[in-house]
Image (cartoon, rainbow, N blue to C red):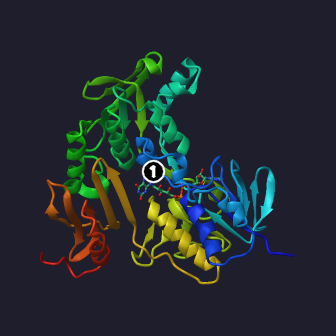
Amino acid sequence: MSPAPIIVVGGGLAAGTLVTQLRERGHDGEVVLLTEEAHAPYERPPLSKDLLLGKTEPQSAAVHDDDGWYPEHGIELRTSTAATAIDPAARRVQAGGDWLDYSDLVLATGSRPRRMAMADEVADEVADEVADESGAAVFYLRTLDDSLELRERLHAGARIGIVGGGWIGLEVASAARQHDAEVTLLESLDLPLLRVLGPEVAQVFADLHREHGVDLRTGAQITGISAHGHADAGGITMALADGAAFDVDAVVVGVGIQPNVELADEAGLTVDNGIRTDARLRTSDEHVHAIGDVANADHPVLGYPVRVEHWDTAIKHAKALAATLTGTPTEATDLPYFFTDQYDLGMEYVGHPGPEGYDRVVLTGDVPGRVFRAWWLRGDTVVAGMHVNDWDAIDEVRRLVGTSDGLPPA
Ligand code: FAD
């Protein structure tokens, strides 16, 4: 009897990369991929950038250009199929009403947007009023379908209210302005991205958006969102604690994400800010693994567990786990890396200041001209580095982050 398949749960970059790597590393056993989405695995960064800008179409976000790759490589791809339960003791997972045996199970279930109750109430109200879905007035951005629906609403003169000045909110603001929509962006803290980048660098992003015509309101406390008519007629009013009120045609909520841990939790696996794993991405059950956004993995270099909600980690985890599953035990050791593109600003960031944080930031280069490098230091240790539009810098950033050599005098 042939061994049970490796079963992968997820339809994102982590799942797609893992099955690809298994085949590239010569694994010739059965592999089943279960995704609740209707699409083959795809990556999400284009959803708030080129796809939203109308520069690319959905298939360009796919992990494989051609969905035929999966059958050609003997991967049983089951779309629109959610895994609903795991029985780790019996090594089986439930999907589509069947229990499927596995030799190893990989959870790459990713994350979902945090909901905003006030906005959801308006969405329900508007949905009751309009017969067709084009009247959708409240958007979250996580899936291909979310992006395509939102894209329909971004046009000259459309009034878009964005809640949250994180990566998603800022990238949507950039796309919306490039479609000539009017954008009001509400951030509760004093600057967008303040917690991620600190005040020195967050200010660069605030200036960038204001220069591009975004009405960026910081320190904004939303006290009410209400629908007063058909969404297509511009029927949503947003009210702030300072007494301001304004009308928008659509609201985009980007207030963070939460990992999809329920499947693991209900199966009794250890869950703590994501599915807990060791550095080889093994959960509390030796035949169940977790990778990508959902994994809170021990990090051998940082010395503490870390859950990273970025593109590169999905790939790096998948590569490390594929190596382990094909006979080369491998830890995921890469430092967190992420990137963004907004208007004509591109940046890459490496590192993780962690619970101890940093005590100073050094900026080198032309900050007003937006071609510079930023370094976060704790003592002499460079805990994180980034560049903005300085495309030769990434090698130096990678080399210096994590070292205690200090920065070169220049
Ligand atoms: P996900 O991409 O979340 O995929 C998880 C998949 O699992 C989903 O398809 C989900 O439907 C499926 N699933 C969940 N539960 C089940 C179940 N029970 N059964 C079956 N299927 C299930 N990162 C960057 O570094 N730079 C960027 O510029 C950037 N831009 C982004 C823009 C957007 C709009 C978004 C949403 C994310 C962006 N990210 C970016 C983050 C990056 O996309 C994520 O880190 C990455 O998608 C994580 O991949 P993943 O495969 O772990 O999870």
Quick check: 183 above or below 338? above
Which amino acid type is marked by label 1? Pro
Which residue shows up at 57% across the image and 20% down it? 128
> Which residue is nearer to you in this view: 229 or 242?
229
Residue where numbered disc 1 is placed: 46
Which residue appears farthest toward the right when viewing the image?
1
Q: Total marks drawn?
A: 1
Residue 285, percent from left and from top = 66, 71
Q: Secondary structure at mark 1?
A: helix
The reply to whether the residue tagged 1 has its Cβ within 8 angstroms of ligand 1 is yes
Which quarter of the rendering shows the N terminus?
Answer: bottom right
Which residue appears farthest toward the top when viewing the image?
229
Quick check: 386 above or below 114? below
Horizontally, residue 139 falls left or right of residue 100, namely left
Q: Does the image show residue 76?
A: yes
Which residue shows up at 51% across the image and 52% down it? 60
Horizontally, residue 118 falls left or right of residue 145, namely left
Residue 311, percent from left and from top = 46, 60
**Quarter of the image where one finds residue 268:** bottom right
Q: Residues within 10 Å of mark 1 (few under 14, many from 20)?
A: many
> Which residue is nearer to you in this view: 29 or 68?
68
Which quarter of the rendering shows the C terminus?
Answer: bottom left
Residue 68, percent from left and from top = 67, 58
Which residue shows up at 57% across the image and 53% down it? 260
Residue 350, percent from left and from top = 34, 67
Q: Does the image show residue 272?
A: no
